[in-house]
Image: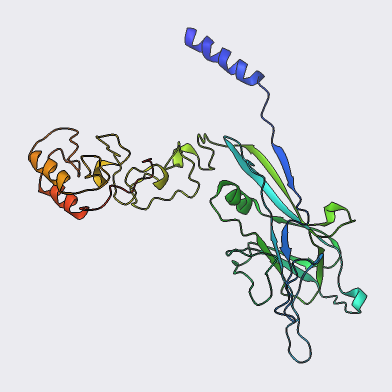
Amino acid sequence: MKRTLWLACVLLVLAGLPARADRIVTVRPGPEGEDSAPYGFFPALVRGGYDTLYAFVGADENGAEHGMQTFLRFELPQGLLGPNERVVSAQLRITYAFDFEQYGNVNDEPGNLRCHVVTQPWSEATLTWMNRPAFDPPFHVLDGITSFRTLGFDVTAQVSGWATGALPNYGVALTSTTERVLGFYAFERTGIDPNVKPYLVIRIGPSALPDADADGVADASDNCPQTPNAAQADEDLDGVGDACDDCTHVANADQRDTDADGFGNACDADFDQNGIVNFGDLAKLKRAFFTTGPDLVADLDGNGTVNFADLARLKQSLFRAPGPSGVAP
C-alpha cells in the first residue's frame, strides 16, 4: 500500500512539471558564408563573390556546356546541441526568385531541383566548374517547379550528422536536370529580404533516450557512453569505442589494466613504466613465469597464468611503446 502511494505521488509531481519545449535555431549566413554557382561555359571562372546562384543544364548550338550548379555550406553555431538534445528536424529553404528573362531566355518546361550531400571540402574562393567537389546522389528531389516560390528540403539527417560530428560538414549541392533556369540570391546579396536568401531552420528538442556524453548516440547504443564519439569508431571491434578503449589496436572488451596506467594489459608489456618495452620488461616477465592469479600485471592475455603466450605478446611489442590507447594521458 505504501509503495503504491509513493508511486502515485511521484507521478503527480512529474505530471506537474512543465514539458521541455523544443527550440528553433535559424542559420542565416551573411557574406562570410560559403556559396557559389560555377558555370560550365566558363569552367575556370570563380563565382564565389557573385550575389546570384543558379541550377540548370543546357548547351548551345555548338554543344558547349552552359549548365550551372549551386554549392552551399552553413557553419552551425558552436554548442548547437546541449546535453541530452537532438536535432528533431531541419529544413533548407531556398527561394526560386528569378530566371534569365532579362536576357530574353525563358524556358517554360517544369523544372526540378535536386539536393545532394557534398563529400569533399571546397571553398567559394577557389571553386570553379573544373574543380567542383564530389557529391552523393540526391537525397531529396523537387519536381514540377513552374513559378517563383520558396522551396524546402528536408535536411534533418544531414544537419544532425554535422551537429554531432558523425558527418563532415561539406555542405550541399543543388542541381537540376532541366533547362529551366532556377535563380537564387547568394549570401553576398544585400538590400533584400533575408528570407529570400538560403537559410536553415533547425528544431532542437530533448533526446528521446538518455545520452550522457551528448554526442547524439543514446547511452544504450553508445560504445563510449561517457566520452563523446559520434562516429562510434572501434578499430579492434571489441565493442569499446576507440575514444575510451585502453587498447585501440588489440581487442580487449574487459579493459583490464592492472597497473592503472591507461594502457590495457593486452597492449602493455611495459612493466617498469619507462615508456618502452625492452629487456628489463622481459626479465620481469620471466620472473613471473608460471605464476597464477586473477589480475597479474604480466598476464597479457588475461587467462590467469603468465606463460609462453604472454612471452609471445611481449616479443611482438619489443622496443615499442605500449598501446596505443584512447585514454592514456
Which residue is rendered at x = 86% and y = 57% of the image?
190
Q: Please provide percent x and percent y for residue 41.
A: 75, 82
The percent position of residue 125, horizontal first and vertical second, equals 70, 66
> Residue 283 at what x, y percent from top left?
11, 44
301 above or below 315?
above
Q: Quadrant of residue 329?
A: top left
Q: Is residue 1 visible?
A: no
Identity of the residue furthest to the top in this view = 2
Q: Looking at the image, what colour scheme do you see?
A: rainbow
Residue 313 seen:
yes
Using the image as rendered, state which of residue 8 and residue 162 is in the foreground.
Answer: 162
Q: Nearer the viewer, residue 148 or 9?
A: 148
Toward the viewer: 292 or 14? 292
* Image quarter of residue 239: top left
Does residue 135 appear left or right of residue 51 in this picture? Answer: left
Question: From the viewer's perspective, is 298 left or right of 155?
Answer: left
| Quadrant of res 221 | top left
* Residue at horizontal 68 percent and vertical 76 percent from the top: 129
Tag count: 0
Q: Position of residue 71 (x, y in %)?
A: 70, 65
| Left or right position of 219 against 169 | left
Relative side of 323 to 231, left or right: left
